[in-house]
Amino acid sequence: MSVSFSTYKADLVRKLYNRRLINKTDVKEIVGSRTRYGLAKRISDCYTEKLEKNYDNALDTTILRGFVLPCEIPLIKFLQTQIENFSIKFAKILSKKDTNPEVLKIKKDIRKDFGIKNLYLDNNLPFSKKIQKALKILKENNVPLANEIIVNSILDSSMGITNPDKRTILLSPRGISDIFSTNSPLHLIIHEGIHLGQPDNPVIQLQKMPDKFKETINNLSLYASDNFILEVHAELKAKQLLRPKKFTKEEGEALFYIENLFKEQSQPSGLSFLL
């Protein structure tokens, strides 16, 4: 039995409000939505803003301290998982249905060649071709592949999310290159794919690179300059795969340091990564 949009909207808003995930001001914004797309977009804006604020507050103390206390791990893990699960759920709603015959063929080829069954390509042919090329590079370099890829055109221009637990990658086809270590149109896809091969460990996630690598990392990319090890690693590895001739000796030393660290601290935690 199909449910009318107004009934669907009222039920969803009621559930979110009762769980204190949105407030009365949010409700006024959300109920004005006239389409499923608009509804999901407004809810996403309200919901993720709150979670991200709580998540950032939880991280501020640990970052200033320089290490994570065991008692803090469950909260950090919970908040980040909630953000990403919510983003992934609504990205599927917002992703355009794949109807282009060429897009459908690429989906079929990706399923056959890479074993990725769940694909939401936003009916975007140019970006679907990029995903196919990037997956080939990742597979040739023995990087673990996703179980699910979701493309969503309303995401921020540099946006990508990787959820290791579900092996899901969420991508914006508008990914920009001026903050990354290469100008390759495949960079965002490669960067997010590399996260799937990293140890899922909150201690490593909040770790920064030693000062001796500071100049190398600052020269690598704007995105790497925040110095968090997992993002530095993704930027280094992406450059190594996409622009091997421009990969410097100093960058190789930084990558060697990180990969040795991964071997030492590879205990899984179920934590996900935001780009």
Image (cartoon, rainbow, N blue to C red):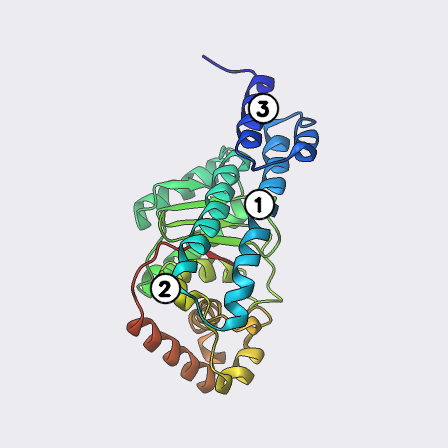
Question: What is the spatial separation of the Cα atoms under label 2 and label 3, in whole angstroms?
Answer: 39 Å
Q: Nearer the viewer, mark 2 or mark 3?
A: 3
Q: Percent position (x, y) of residue 5?
A: 58, 19
Q: Percent position (x, y) of residue 6?
A: 60, 18
Which of marks 3 and 2 precedes in the sequence? 3
Circle 2: residue type: Gln
Q: Is residue 150 above or below residue 174?
A: above
Which of marks 1 and 3 precedes in the sequence? 3
Residue indicated by mark 1: 48
Question: What is the spatial separation of the Cα atoms under label 3 and label 1, in whole angstroms?
Answer: 18 Å
Circle 1: residue type: Thr
Query: Considering the numbered disc 1 on the image, is that residue within a helix, a strand or a loop?
Result: helix
Q: Determine which quarter of the picture holds residue 268.
A: bottom left
Give 169 or 204, whichever is nearer the viewer.
204
Residue indicated by mark 2: 198
At label 1, counting other C-alpha atoms closer than 10 Å, the crowd grade (few under 14, some 14-19, many 20 or more) is: some
Question: What is the spatial separation of the Cα atoms under label 2 and label 1, in whole angstroms?
Answer: 25 Å
Instruction: Evaluate if marks 2 and 1 touch, with contact meaning CB atoms under 8 Å apart.
Output: no
Q: Is residue 208 above or below residue 200?
A: below
Circle 3: residue type: Lys
Residue indicated by mark 3: 9
Q: Is residue 248 above or below residue 261?
A: below
